[in-house]
Image: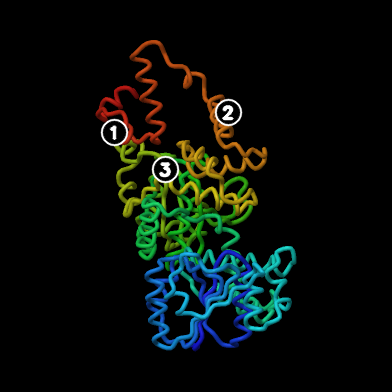
Amino acid sequence: MAKTLILTGWKYSDYAVAAALALRHFRTADILGMSRRRLPEYLEEVSGYTEIAILGVSLTGDAERLGKALARLKKDKVKVTWISALDFPVWMEDNVRSSLESYISPSGNIAVAVAEYYRQDYNELAAYGDVSQAVGKAYMELMEAAEYYYRNYRDEQAYPRVIRHISAKDAESKWTDGERRMLEHFRHYGHRELLGNSAAIQKLREDVNRIAVHDHARVLILGESGTGKETVAIQIHFKSPRKDEPFIPFNCSSVTPNLLESRFLGYEKGAFTGATETKQGIFEQANGGTLFLDEIGELPLEAQGLLLRVLEEGRFHRLGVNAREVEVDVRVIAATNRDLAEMVRDGKFRLDLYHRLCIVQLRVPPLREHKEDILRLAQTYRERNGWGGQPSAEQLEALQAYDFPGNVRELHNLLERASVLDIDDYGELIRQHKELNAALLPQDKVEIPDNLEEATRCHVKHVCEKYSHNITKAAEALGVSRNTVRKYLE
């Protein structure tokens, strides 16, 4: 372990360049990405260093804990230096100020501040923080990938490795194969995160982390359309021991029933008209990894039997004469917005398959149940796609007043529409959005029948659709029994 520790911020390239400049001064140092919220807690526990440089990380976290942590480090003769382009918070306690050495630059740029303090040439590394230049753009994406790996997989070393590359002025050719894989993974899945800090999303993340390590346990993910069920499946896969093996998604409603067997099992050349070459099925493609079966409730009964057989035996034959037996080791994750238990009772889904798939069950909450996450979601979508930054208070109020029946997918689409049409008034945007959706509904879904019995039947059907045909939830919402709901659906 090095004797010096560099703590730097996330998100902006200036933080990485600042740390790279500090590393040029120290030559050998440990590096860690740090947030203001985590800083007091981290400084309470850190040990083994003679010097700690805090670069641009705000001191506005828990003031009491921060003061005690800094006092302990000072007593242990650890030199703590805080370098910033912003002044101390006006309310900062004297014990915090006196426990560290500080340098505040009027430049407004943390990288410039570090260069000034450690007498380094800022221009040597300035291009690495400038996204208008090719090298800055490339390194910015690598930094974003490293941050993504920390947020999702708790890889604390990815970001420091990027900083070391910048400090050494490494060309992209010096990036390791592991860093290239990380970047490729980020390009494919960087937009598939479980965003939010609500209790519901935190619990979901905790459940995903617990489930992921049990890489043979099948998972059934339940949730309304647009809630992010595939994102949950991706998170489970890439947090599991199977993370380096294939993740194969398959939508069970995307293929006609007569083609499902060939998609599941694959086929040999000449197996049927049009089979001009041997082709693997989805189970074989996913061998060693994860097969994600989306919309499993749409799978026809005859195909359910085929799926059950493969799950039970772990082997099958491709279609075709003299096809060899294929043995596979695949984790299956299934997802649906349907009430599978109800489908089992109605004879539309096999009970034995249901039990095979439902070793572990996860529910992804609809957006209306965690509206406090809309700010984080909206800001992330806007920044990631170049649609702006944090929404205004008025925009956020309008978003939170809407229930989003299409969930996070609908929120994303709404924000994209606002950007394309250059609409800042989100209240007006949502009003137009509702009108458009109402116009797309069949007329019989809009008009309310005069007859009370028919009006009740219409309302019950509407509530069932709202709860993705989950009879239990619809009955609870209506305040009636399940049998009453079934009566009006007949």
Could you tell whether 439 is left or right of 464 in the image? right
Mark 3 surroundings within 10 Å by alpha-carbon count, few (fewer than 14), some (14 through 19), many (20 or more)? many
CA distance separating discs 3 and 1: 16 Å
Residue behind mark 3: 366
Indicate the position of residue 473 as horizontal and vertical percent values.
32, 36
Residue 453 position (above or below residue 269):
above
Asked whether disc 3 touches disc 1, contact meaning CB atoms under 8 Å apart, the reply is no
Q: Amino acid at mark 1?
A: Glu
Asked whether disc 3 touches disc 2, contact meaning CB atoms under 8 Å apart, the reply is no
Front residue of 446 and 101? 101
Rendered-image quadrant of the C terminus? top left
Taking the spot 52% from the left edge, 22% from the top edge, the residue there is 442
- The image's mark for residue 359 is none
Front residue of 99 and 229? 99
Q: Amino acid at mark 3?
A: Pro
Identify the mark nearer the N-term, 3 or 2. Answer: 3
Residue 389 position (above or below residue 48):
above
Give SS at disc 1. Answer: helix
Residue behind mark 1: 476
Front residue of 327 and 362? 362
Asked whether disc 2 touches disc 1, contact meaning CB atoms under 8 Å apart, the reply is no
